[in-house]
Image (cartoon, helix red, strand yellow):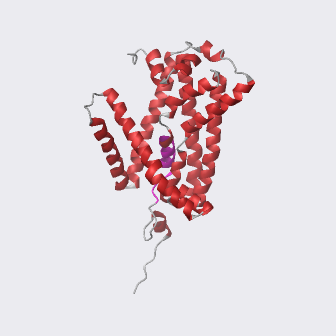
Amino acid sequence: MPVETTTESQRTLGYGSSELRRVLGLRDLVFLIVGTVIGSGIFLVPSTVVRSVNKSVSLALFVWILGGLLSLLGALTYGELSAMKPEAGGLYVYIRDCFGELAAFLFGWILFFVVSTGSVATLAVAFSNYLGGIVELRPGTPKLISLLVIAITAAVNIRGTRQSADLQSLTTVIKLVAVLAMAVGLLWFSRGAHTHAMSASSMPPAGSAWAGLGTALVSVLWAYEGWQYCTYTAGETLNPQRNFPLAFAMGIGILAGAYLLANLGYLAALGSDGVANSTRVAASALETQSPLLAK
């Protein structure tokens, strides 16, 4: 009777074994990191940061750079862990191996019942709310739309890793292009309008500066939060020893550049006073500076 054998290439793809198919490449990981992180943070945090540092533009930009560096250090650490243990589960695997199965068990169920569930629900509701600002929705329709968004996303993920990765990449490109286009547009339309406000911002007293920097840094790190979720795909990634460290470095670099450019656009359009006093800084900047988008 012939004995079935499994080649190395088949094992890599998951054939002839219980492993998941490894179909994700470097580009997929970068898009996953960037797309997971970019969200409401870049539209909510800038005003909090500027207020916390007493409207000092130089300190505000410094905090965004510092947050990016700290996120990069954490991301590279996770990149090494993903390369060492390229298994499905990500954080669950690391917690299990470091702190034991009970800690990992509790983490997994908390993630399932509270953290990820609440995050998905929040994003679905936010989608329907913003859609309601564009088109008129009947009462009760936003809830149905939120449920439909969750159902479609789940269906795509169930269909296959490749299909869900392609959808993730598409939505990430749309978000990133939109943020960059907004930032470049604000810088272009408001050339010189608030140059004096950006260069003449006052430095806070030494004592309050440290407290303000700490408060601002917490907000900035929240805006950078989300890159760790990429580790859950370690069991489906090709050449994880190479791709994970590179993906984390490239992803954080892209995020830091996009965030800095967006903040420069806000400051150029509104000045430090305008950014600090706005509750929706992106909308305020667009309404004030762009004649085509102003109401």
Q: Residue 50's x, y, as percent?
A: 60, 24
34 is within the stretch colored magenta: yes
Q: Going by the image, does 77 lie left or right of 155?
A: right
Q: Nearer the viewer, residue 33 or 119?
A: 119
The residue under the point 58% across, 58% down is 95
Q: Residue 86's x, y, as percent?
A: 55, 60
Q: Is residue 248 above or below residue 267?
A: below
The residue under the point 39% across, 50% down is 164
The residue under the point 44% across, 38% down is 173
Q: Going by the image, does 157 lie left or right of 211?
A: left
Q: Which residues are magenta?
A: 22-35
Q: Nearer the viewer, residue 135 or 235?
A: 135
The residue under the point 61% across, 61% down is 99
Q: Quadrant of the C terminus?
A: top left
248 is within the stretch colored magenta: no
Most extreme residue toward the right, as rendered? 206
Q: Nearer the viewer, residue 236 or 135?
A: 135
Please tell me how many numbered marks the rendered image carries: 0
Q: Quadrant of the N terminus?
A: bottom left
Q: Is residue 234 visible?
A: no
Q: Nearer the viewer, residue 103 or 252?
A: 103
Q: Residue 186's x, y, as percent?
A: 50, 20
Image quadrant in which you'd find residue 219: top right
